[in-house]
């Protein structure tokens, strides 16, 4: 006969069955701020539907299943024919299908498309981050393809479709497609101009045979890929379809799948081209210029993805502290834990606010806004993605030993957290891109200074940080060695300006005091005790 030795008490219930979008005060306010009133009801309804899915028990289970059953490579069929396929757990396809159906690849062809997609991507990342990669690649392929109007007319309707079709078959027979990308090679890494993949012109105008390799090919199960290769006229962008128009498989030799730290549900591969058929995108020699639109869009997605991961880490920590009893009261009400939670919440709010502001600039599309993006995107990508890992680790610690256990979900967030900092150019690349924009595009700095100058005089610490930044910008001689410092300061000043302008006073006060005013320690939980920490932490609590 079984004996009862204890009862289970004081355990935090799972955070499930809630609307990830409407439960986020910061995100809902940002969407309202950047969406025209006539569209707002429709956008809210769509995002709330996605938020309910992301917070549901079923979708959370799909996320766990996809991560616990990573993709596998099948190079040959049973008869020895080369097939080069990646097999995924059914949960992966369900997640990706929901993301496509929610319009996360459809920003380019609907009003407020970038803001609503940015908010949706931030929400969907919290359900499962791995499937965001193909969603991002598919979305970002559109501006690159627009370098060739004929190609764009053919492919854009498929890329922006809300239909997910997982079967490998000719693109013209599909209602929707997904795209991947391959730029990185073994010898070059981020130095894409070191690429050695060769492109030999074929008889049909604009078509080439590619020979070479790619060290990282994102989303190798996709219908098409944008790659860089060296044509007679120089480094050029190409579209490589996975299946040719006659139904035969293109030569796309998957050598192995990468065994990654995180992002386990998603596949990244090494791929060989051996006479692979490709269509040129843009002019020969203009490869970097052509593909840079895709890179810029995916860099913004790195910011949004990191903001989503931070939000989920913070909301899990707040949820745990709200329910956990310690030392005679709720953990949430203990002064030291409240300081930690408020500090984490500040980082999350600043990331979300900045990410949505960048998306709104894409929707605006005006000359000044595009100039602003040229400088703000690499600065934001540099800083926000680097803040993700410390936030995830500290949030896991808020759960104590429970946060170190896989079932809590926090270890998955911790493993995922460095990805966006590495993807699409690591920290040094972003910092150097900031310098490049400063040197070559003075209108970018003008647009940045106009943006942060909107709140000049509203907070003395922000004013001081702006002044110090201008001193840094006045001397760009020998600046490469301090490029990271400059990118960090630009991102912090921009976040501070946005929070002073849009956040509640207690949030802006705490951010400026700590991040800009220097009243902060080296770890989270070191905010000045005179701040309204209770209100800041309460603001991060899921509201529904």
Image (tube, rainbow, N blue to C red):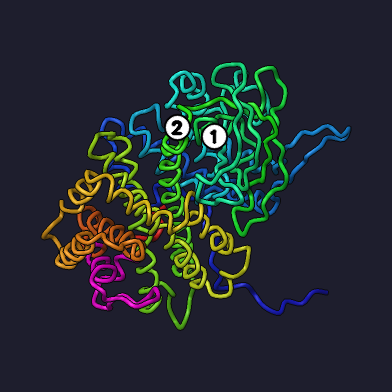
| Segment colored magenta | 508-537
Give neighbour class at mark 2: few <14, some 14-19, many 20+ (Cα, 10 Å).
many
Circle 1 sits in a helix, a strand or a loop, which is it?
strand
In the rendered image, the quadrant that contains the N terminus is bottom right
For the residue pair 182 and 399, the one nearer the viewer reads as: 182
Residue farthest bottom in this picture:
327
Residue on which disc 2 sits? 144
Residue farthest right in this picture:
79
Examine the structure image and report whether residue 514 is included in the region drawn in magenta.
yes
Instruction: Identify the mark nearer the N-term, 1 or 2.
Output: 2
Left or right of 383, for residue 61? right
Q: Position of residue 16 (x, y in %)?
A: 53, 54
Give the label on residue 226, or none: 1
Q: Residue at x 22, y 46 (%)?
A: 442
For the residue pair 296 and 198, the one nearer the viewer reads as: 198
Give the label on residue 16, or none: none
Residue 354 visible from this viewpoint: yes
Give neighbour class at mark 1: few <14, some 14-19, many 20+ (Cα, 10 Å).
many
Left or right of 367, for residue 124? right
Quarter where residue 359 is shown? top left
Circle 2 sits in a helix, a strand or a loop, which is it?
helix
Q: Are marks 1 and 2 in contact (CB under 8 Å)?
A: yes
For the residue pair 295 and 5, the one nearer the viewer reads as: 295
Left or right of 91, for residue 452? left
Q: Residue at x 74, y 37 (%)?
A: 84
């Amino acid at each position: 006969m079984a004996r009862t030795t204890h009862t289970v008490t004081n355990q935090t219930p799972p955070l499930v069955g809630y609307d990830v979008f409407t439960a986020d005060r910061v995100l809902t306010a940002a969407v309202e701020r950047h969406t025209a009133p006539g569209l707002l009801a429709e956008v809210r309804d769509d995002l709330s539907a996605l938020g309910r899915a992301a917070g549901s028990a079923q979708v959370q289970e799909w996320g766990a299943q996809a991560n616990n059953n990573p993709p596998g490579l099948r190079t040959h069929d049973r008869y020895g024919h080369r097939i080069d396929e990646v097999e995924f757990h059914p949960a992966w396809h369900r997640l990706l299908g929901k993301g496509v159906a929610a319009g996360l690849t459809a920003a380019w062809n609907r009003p407020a498309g970038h803001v609503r997609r940015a908010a949706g991507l931030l929400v969907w990342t919290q359900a499962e981050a791995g499937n965001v990669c193909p969603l991002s690649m598919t979305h970002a392929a559109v501006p690159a393809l627009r370098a060739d109007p004929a190609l764009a007319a053919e492919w854009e309707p498929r890329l922006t479709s809300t239909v997910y079709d997982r079967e490998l078959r000719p693109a013209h027979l599909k209602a929707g497609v997904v795209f991947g990308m391959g730029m990185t090679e073994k010898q070059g890494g981020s130095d894409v101009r070191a690429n050695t993949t060769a492109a030999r012109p074929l008889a049909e105008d604009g078509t080439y045979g590619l020979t070479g390799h790619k060290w990282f090919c994102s989303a190798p199960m996709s219908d098409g890929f944008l790659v860089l290769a060296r044509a007679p006229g120089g480094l050029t962008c190409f579209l490589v379809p996975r299946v040719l128009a006659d139904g035969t498989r293109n030569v796309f030799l998957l050598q192995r799948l990468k065994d990654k730290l995180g992002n386990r549900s998603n596949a990244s591969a090494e791929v060989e081209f051996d006479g692979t058929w490709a269509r040129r995108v843009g002019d020969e020699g203009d490869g970097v210029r052509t593909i840079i639109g895709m890179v810029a869009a995916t860099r913004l997605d790195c910011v949004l993805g990191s903001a989503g991961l931070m939000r989920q880490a913070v909301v899990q920590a707040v949820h745990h502290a709200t329910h956990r009893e310690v030392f005679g009261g709720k953990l949430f009400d203990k002064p030291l834990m409240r300081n930690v939670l408020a500090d984490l919440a500040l980082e999350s709010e600043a990331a979300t606010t900045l990410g949505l502001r960048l998306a709104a600039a894409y929707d605006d599309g005006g000359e000044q806004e595009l100039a602003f993006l040229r400088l703000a995107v690499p600065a934001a990508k540099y800083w926000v993605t680097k803040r993700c890992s410390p936030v995830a680790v500290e949030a896991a610690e808020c759960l104590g030993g429970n946060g170190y256990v896989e079932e809590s979900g926090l270890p998955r967030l911790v493993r995922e957290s460095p990805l966006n900092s590495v993807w699409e150019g690591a920290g040094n690349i972003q910092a150097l891109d900031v310098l490049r924009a400063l040197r070559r595009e003075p209108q970018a700095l003008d647009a940045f200074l106009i943006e942060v100058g909107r709140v000049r005089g509203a907070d003395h610490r922000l004013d001081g940080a702006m002044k110090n930044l201008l001193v840094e910008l006045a001397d760009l001689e020998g600046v490469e060695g301090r490029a990271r410092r400059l990118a960090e300061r630009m991102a912090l000043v921009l976040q501070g300006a946005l929070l002073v302008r849009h956040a509640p006073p207690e949030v802006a006060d705490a951010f400026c005091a700590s991040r800009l005013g220097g009243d902060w320690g080296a770890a989270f939980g070191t905010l000045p005790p005179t701040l309204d920490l209770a209100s800041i932490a309460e603001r991060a609590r899921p509201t529904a």
